[in-house]
Image: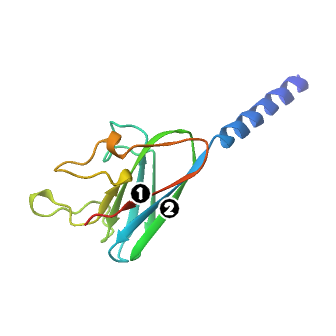
Amino acid sequence: MLKWLFTLCAAVVMAVIAMQANAADLIVAVEGVRNGEGDIRFALYDQSKEFPTGEKLKGQEENAKTGAVQTIFKNLAPGTYAVAVHHDENRDDKMNLGLFVFPLEGYGFSNNARVVFVPPTFDAAAFTIGARSMAISLTMVY
C-alpha cells in the first residue's frame, strides 16, 4: 500500500513538472497611454465566442501611466489567444461611451486589430503561444 501511494505521488509530481515545463509567460506592453489616470485593464481570451466582451480566461490591471504600461500573464499553456485592453480612466469598471456609441476611453487589441464600427474578431487579434514565453505590444486607441 505504501509503495502504491509513493508511486502515485511521484506520478503527480512528474505531471505537474511536465505541465509547468510547457507553460509560458506572456508579456503584454501597451504603448500610447495618454495619461496616468485610472487603470489599464488587460483581458486574455482563448475562446473566440467570448472575445472581446465575454468571459475572459484571465484578467489583470495595472496603474495607468503616461506612455507605456505592461503586464505579465504567467503559466499559459501552448495555444491561441487574443488580448483586449481598456484604459479605465475614471475607475468605474466600464467602457464609457459618447455620442453614437464612440468610446470615450482608450482601448486596444492584440495585433493592433482595428475597430471598424464593431470590435475586431478573435481571429484578427489572435496569436499563438508555444512552450516559450513571448512578448507582444499594442497601441492604445483614443
Residue drawn 20% across the image and 61% down it: 103
- x, y (%) of residue 3? 90, 25
Q: Which residue is at the front of the view, 7 or 107?
A: 107
User: Considering the numbered disc 1 on the image, is that residue within a helix, a strand or a loop?
Assistant: strand
> Which residue is at 23% across, 52% downward?
115
- Amino acid of disc 1: Phe
Disc on res. 59: none
Category of crowding for the residue at label 1, using alpha-carbon neighbours closer than 10 angstroms: few (below 14), some (14–19), many (at least 20): many
Give the image location of residue 27, x and y in percent: 52, 57
In 3D space, how far apart are the residues under numbered discs 1 and 2 (Cα atoms)?
A: 8 Å
Are the residues tagged 1 and 2 within 8 Å (C-beta)?
yes
SS class of the residue under badge 2?
strand
* Residue occupying the point 16% across, 50% down: 117
The answer to whether residue 94 shows anywhere in this view is yes
- Please give the label number shown on residue 42: 1
* Residue 126, above or below 61: above
Seen in the image, is 134 located left or right of residue 35? right
Quadrant where the N terminus sits is top right
What colour scheme has been applied to the protein in the rendered image? rainbow
Q: Position of residue 107 (x, y in %)?
A: 30, 60
Query: Does residue 74 appear in this view?
Result: no
- Quadrant of the snapshot with the C terminus: bottom left
Estimate how packed mark 2 is, as few (under 14), some (14 to 19) or many (20 or more) residues with alpha carbons within 10 Å: some
Residue 130: quarter of image: top right
Q: Which residue is tagged 2? A: 71
Residue 57 vs 73, above or below: the answer is above
The amino acid pointed to by label 2 is Thr
